[in-house]
Amino acid sequence: MGSDLPRLSEQSITPGARWIYSAGFNVGPQLRDTERIDCEIADLDRLAVAGARIAILSHQGSHRDGSAGSLEFVAAYLSRRLGRPVDYVAENDTDAAVAYPLAPGRIALFGNTRQHAGEERNDPALARRFARLGDRVAVGGFSKAHRAHASNVGLIDLLPACAADSFLDEIDALTPWTGIRDDVFSVAVLGGTKPEKTLHGLAFLTQSYDLVIPGGAVLNTLLRVRGCAIGSSELGPAPERCAEVAAEMLARRNRAAIHLPEYVLAADPIRPHSPPVLVPIADGVPAGLTIVDFLVRPWVLERLGAPGRAGRAVVAGTPSRYRDGHTRAADPILRALRDSRWRTLLMGGDTCADLPWDGPSSTGGGSALEYLATGTCAVIRALERNIRAGSGR
């Protein structure tokens, strides 16, 4: 798939040309994990060395909850990594933003795209205002490739576009974990709170993998659908849609065995570090408590450690509240998957930041899951449209 898309390193970059670079710098001001920035450095340097004038558009947080703040800290970090100044321009869709002076080889990071309500719904008018910042667009930010936003898909539908090498490298790196394999045992660990872990991961990997271990909101949704009391456990931002997918999955015949624990650990959500209570699922989680961890059934660890078994595994989302000290599920699973017989990939910025892991990883969480499940995503489809429209430009 990636080899069919236009690659930034294969483009002729004219000195002084105006390029928009759509990035995925969704990291917090503490810069706890900079992988989503670091993976874009080589592409930005390529444009700057060739003399392009580069306007970067990126996001952090969300307009919906008011967490979309300034990206000035990212500009400072980029300056250090690139060894060249990266200006910060707080606006991104105004006449003043368009008029900001950029000399050839200079880079500016413009304001957080999620400060606009229209960014996440791919508002065409907002995309047109963004498009005034350049004449061509290079699309990085694989971590948001599954989302049709104004600053990626919206721009691709308006300007000649190519994929950043970092974007295509992510796709190539996912290849060993795609499709059905009969020669290896395939395991998916699904956690966190984002709905795509259920809508894509649970829906599709249960049909192509051999074992699925749900955690986080994925597990809570499954337990709720099965009629178990889950107290005040987290269900994520799209609980009803996820419940429909979970019910459909449970009602059908799946390739995968699905691990549902016999015991969970529940704690007071107001005091996440407080000692948890061991709760049998059959008894239900008391009101006011939230599931923070679970005990892995012995048969799962036996399958993971079976002598002579070669395997591949994806860990998409933290299965328990690991950062709060709840490690009963994650530690034995990770210990088993560190064995040299396993080819294991951690997916998503939060997953990589939360879990102790020094093996292969992908900055994409939802985007990587969608690509594993369907072989495409919103940005790939937009780039394919862009190719077809190219002859008419």
Image (cartoon, grey):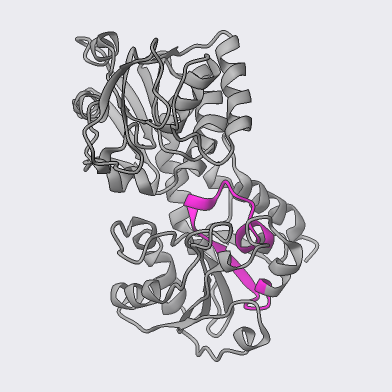
In which quarter of the view is residue 285 placed? top left
Q: Residue at x 69, y 57 (%)?
A: 122
Where is 91 relative to 145, above or below? below
Q: Residue at x 31, y 63 (%)?
A: 31
Where is 344 relative to 227, above or below? below
In which quarter of the view is residue 249 placed? top right
Where is 313 relative to 140, above or below? above
Q: Is residue 223 magenta?
A: no
In which quarter of the view is residue 63 placed? bottom right
- In the depicted view, which residue is nearer to us: 155 or 59? 59
Where is 296 relative to 97, above or below? above
- In the depicted view, which residue is nearer to us: 350 or 336? 350
Q: Picture coordinates of residue 53 (x, y %)?
A: 52, 82
Quadrant where the image shows the C terminus: bottom right
Q: Picture coordinates of residue 160 (x, y %)?
A: 67, 65
* Furthest residue toward right: 392
Quadrant where the image shows the N terminus: top right
Q: Picture coordinates of residue 43 (x, y %)?
A: 43, 65
Say whether residue 240 is left or right of residue 287: right
Q: Residue at x 52, y 80 (%)?
A: 90
Q: Is residue 193 visible?
A: yes
Q: In this picture, which residue range is highlighted in magenta?
A: 130-154
* Furthest residue toward front: 287
Q: Residue at x 51, y 43 (%)?
A: 367
Say whether residue 102 is left or right of residue 125: left
Q: Picture coordinates of residue 15 (x, y %)?
A: 53, 83
- Number of residue marks: 0
